Image (cartoon, rainbow, N blue to C red):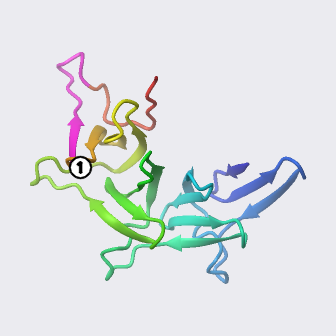
């Protein structure tokens, strides 16, 4: 059982032994948590825990060695994360691992290589590109079409991403239309069955 505290540190609780293990950043240990600001958490289909951190990149927990591996932006490496603020982590039914970073950027992250295979950046001059937002807060795969991902963004609203066509559709706020999106600040989405 993982616990995240307001100060960003993590605890792992073992309900059988009733013991807590505290994890926090240690400047002297490169295998410690990258920063005390973990804001997103995800356990992938292989049981590996991942953490998205504010200015600490994407962090993988290594249960065999009880330490962490951190993936950060490397300015001269186009295959690294585009930013070190990781707001959301998600694995779709095809096993594609999605990571969103500051500025509304969405990435396909390759867990085997530790590199980004594809980056979707906001581009107002490119029709069908991901709309601009502060950050993507939530990602959900469509129940009926696994090619569709629904993205909820902070100051960006709701987007539909079609993986087959690599295109995005935005659902904008329109105060004159009572059937339009109510607010462009969305923190969570859930698709019912």
Q: Is 62 included in the stretch rendered in magenta?
A: no
Residue 81 visible in the snapshot: no
Residue 191, position in %: x, y?
A: 43, 28
Q: Nearer the viewer, residue 13 or 186?
A: 13
Vertical placement of 138 versus 121: above or below? above
Residue 183, position in %: x, y?
A: 32, 30
Q: Which residue is mark 1?
A: 130
Count of marks placed on residues: 1
Vertical placement of 27 versus 92: above or below? below
Vertical placement of 36 versus 77: above or below? above
The region drawn magenta spans: 167-180
Quadrant hosting residue 47: bottom right
- Secondary structure predominantly adopted by residues drawn in magenta: loop
Residue 10, position in %: x, y?
A: 68, 58
Residue 47 visible in the snapshot: yes
Horizontal side of 170 relative to 116 (left or right) equals left
Residue 108, position in %: x, y?
A: 36, 59
User: Which residue: 29% across, 62% down?
Assistant: 119
Q: Nearer the viewer, residue 130 or 178?
A: 130
Quadrant hosting residue 178: top left
Circle 1 SS class: loop
User: Which residue: 41% across, 49% down?
Assistant: 94
Q: Residues within 10 Å of mark 1 (few under 14, many from 20)?
A: many
Vertical placement of 189 versus 82: above or below? above
User: Which residue: 17% across, 19% down?
Assistant: 176
Q: Residue furthest top?
A: 178
Q: Is 171 included in the stretch rendered in magenta?
A: yes
Horizontal side of 102 relative to 34 (left or right) equals left
Horizontal side of 68 relative to 75 (left or right) equals right
Q: Residue furthest front?
A: 94
């Amino acid at each position: 059982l993982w616990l995240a505290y307001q100060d960003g540190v993590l605890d792992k609780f073992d309900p059988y032994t009733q013991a807590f293990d505290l994890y926090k950043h240690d400047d002297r240990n490169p295998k410690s948590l990258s920063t005390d600001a973990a804001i997103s958490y995800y356990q992938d289909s292989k049981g590996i825990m991942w953490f998205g951190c504010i200015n600490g990149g994407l962090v993988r927990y290594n249960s065999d060695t009880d330490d962490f591996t951190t993936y950060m932006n490397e300015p001269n490496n186009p295959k690294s994360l585009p930013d070190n603020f990781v707001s959301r982590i998600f694995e779709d039914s095809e096993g594609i691992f999605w990571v969103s970073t500051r500025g509304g950027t969405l990435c396909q992250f390759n867990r085997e290589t530790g590199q980004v295979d594809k980056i979707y950046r906001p581009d107002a001059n490119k029709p069908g590109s991901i709309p601009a937002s502060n950050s993507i807060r939530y990602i959900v795969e469509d129940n009926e079409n696994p090619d569709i991902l629904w993205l909820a963004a902070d100051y960006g609203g709701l987007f539909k991403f079609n993986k087959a066509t690599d295109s995005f559709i935005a659902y904008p706020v329109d105060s004159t239309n009572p059937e339009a999106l109510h607010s462009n600040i969305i923190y969570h989405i859930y698709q019912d069955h």
